[in-house]
Image (tube, rainbow, N blue to C red):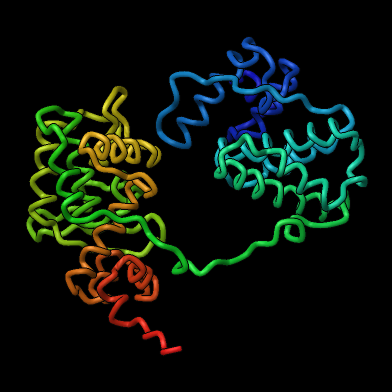
Amino acid sequence: FFNYCVKHDIVQVTVPIAVEFVKESFGFDFYNTTSRFQTVLRRPLLILFEFEEFGNYKKTHQRGSTTKIPLVYETVYREFVDHVNLMPIGLKTRERKIWSFTKYLEYLESTGILTLSQIEYNTVHEYIASLDGFAPATVRVIKTNLREAYDWMYGKKYVRFSGRQMFPVIRKDPRNKLLSHYSKEEIRQLVSCIDTETAAGKCVYAIICLLTYLGMRAGDVIALKFRDIDWDKGVISYSQQKTGNPLTLPLLDEVKFPLLDYIRNGRHESADPEYIFVTLYAPYTKYSCTSSVFRMVEKCMRTAGIDYEGRHHGPHSLRHSLAANMLAENVPISAISNIMGHSSTKTTEVYLTVDETHLKEISLEVPNA
């Protein structure tokens, strides 16, 4: 690949360049390997882009399910791949978009639809109905990707309707839902079940304390840097990953001492020295995503014997729990909003849905029949 870049005077490596390199040099589709040999050839490039994007990389890259590009749709497939490669998105997101499109093209061919002009509204809905074996979250991703693909095809005049017409985007009021939360006793069980005698336990304990006592988002926890903590003033100040807005929180003793214990006795030397939390296993880099935090919380809940059936049980549920429990103790909405880092108290009002005491106070009496 290095020689290919030198030969073509390429000074900035991108995924589209790697796609073209694989196609030109080895004759297969970067996004759709069909043999173990092709997967092995592609692996160094995946490592390169993963390391560039996340600062680390997977030890293995499974080939996954193989999709065959229908010959009648090969041209539109290639055009769509070129379109996706121009998007400012990560490698995995590109792969998901292309995979969704490819599976749909396979479906079209299997049902005898050999030109895009034959597609009707019911064609798409019948395809979605055929996905009953997939998890609901996966189906939502596929629908989103198909909506974007149809918008692109409609813009190219390949189809007669857009993705927005096929799958209208319905904006929901975020307050029209019940949030999962846990009582103070359940939170106490969660925190007390962690073994803080091990290095891994010290890391998990510090992370759980930030989630439960300060209500931090998981993305903010793994992005926390040493410069964000003012030990003398007793505050944590950082820019929120979700909004970019600055937030300052008190460095409570329940957070301060677990952090110090982890930093002094549990944290490994890392290639990312500015980040507080690093992975539990070599090469000890910063966390690239929040899935590890989710697994930590889920494992702790199981260990603590907390029954979470029917409730969300990830890190965000701990954030919800802090807000709901403060509201139950008559902490003003404005104060809770400040701690949560919300730009408006309207966002915080969603926690009224889990506060039975205050809901009863504002409920209307049913008139006599």
Q: How many marks?
A: 0
Q: Name the quadrant containing residue 9.
A: top right
Query: In the depicted view, which residue is nearer to us: 224 or 95?
Result: 95
- Which percent across, then down, holds residue 317? 33, 52
Q: Quadrant of the N terminus?
A: top right
Picture residue at 64% right of the left edge, 50% below the top: 144
Q: What residue sits 23% from the left and 73% below the top?
A: 335
At x 36%, y 73%, the residue is: 349
295 in relation to 176, above or below: above
Query: Observer-nearest residue: 359 or 233?
Result: 359
Is 172 displayed left or right of 177 in the figure? right
- Residue toward you, 39 or 193: 193
Furthest residue in direction front, as rendered: 369
Looking at the picture, how far across and down is residue 73, in whole percent? Answer: 85, 34
Residue 177, given in percent of the width and then of the height, sits at 45, 64
Horizontal relation, residue 368 to residue 197: left or right:
right
Q: Is residue 61 left or right of residue 21?
A: left
Whether residue 211 appears in this view of the structure is yes
